[in-house]
Image: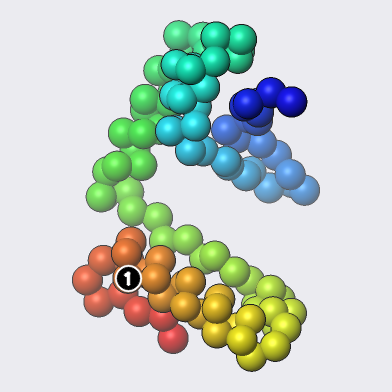
Amino acid sequence: MKPWFDVPVFNWLGGQLTTIYVGQYIWSAQQNFPEARRLAQAELEALDVLDTLADDPALRLVLVLVQTAVWKTAGDRSARAKLLSLWKGIVEHYGGPGASVR
């Protein structure tokens, strides 16, 4: 088994654009695993642009983490409490001033 995996940053799934991007994983694979596919210059530049955009507070994106269906199927009360705790932690960490989970 390889110590890395190949996955596109952007992909179409069920007619919707999805993304999986953790720059740290990409850069780590490029630095530490010479047998991993080398990114082309254009790919490296695109990732730099993506990082720049992701760090721009003017382009802040608020993500809805869980749909109602997931909440309804969360199971017992303790499972819902764990989900709520997770959401609150994310909002408190990334949500900025005045952010809350209701």
Q: Which of these two is toward me, 12 or 6?
A: 6
Residue pushed farthest bottom? 77
Asked if one can make out residue 20 in the rendered structure from this viewpoint, the answer is yes
- Residue ID for mark 1: 92
Residue positioned 48% across, 38% down in the render = 22
In the displayed structure, 46 sits above or below 36; it is: below
Report the side of 87 relative to 52 (left or right). right
Asked whether the viewer can see residue 43, the reply is no
The foreground one among 33 and 85 is 33
Q: Residues within 10 Å of mark 1 (few under 14, many from 20)?
A: some
**Residue 47: percent from the left, percent from the top?**
43, 26
The answer to whether 36 appears left or right of 102 in the picture is right
Q: Quadrant of the C terminus?
A: bottom left
Q: Quadrant of residue 3?
A: top right
- Residue 94 point in image, percent of width and height: 33, 61
Residue 37 versus residue 96: which sits nearer the camera? 37
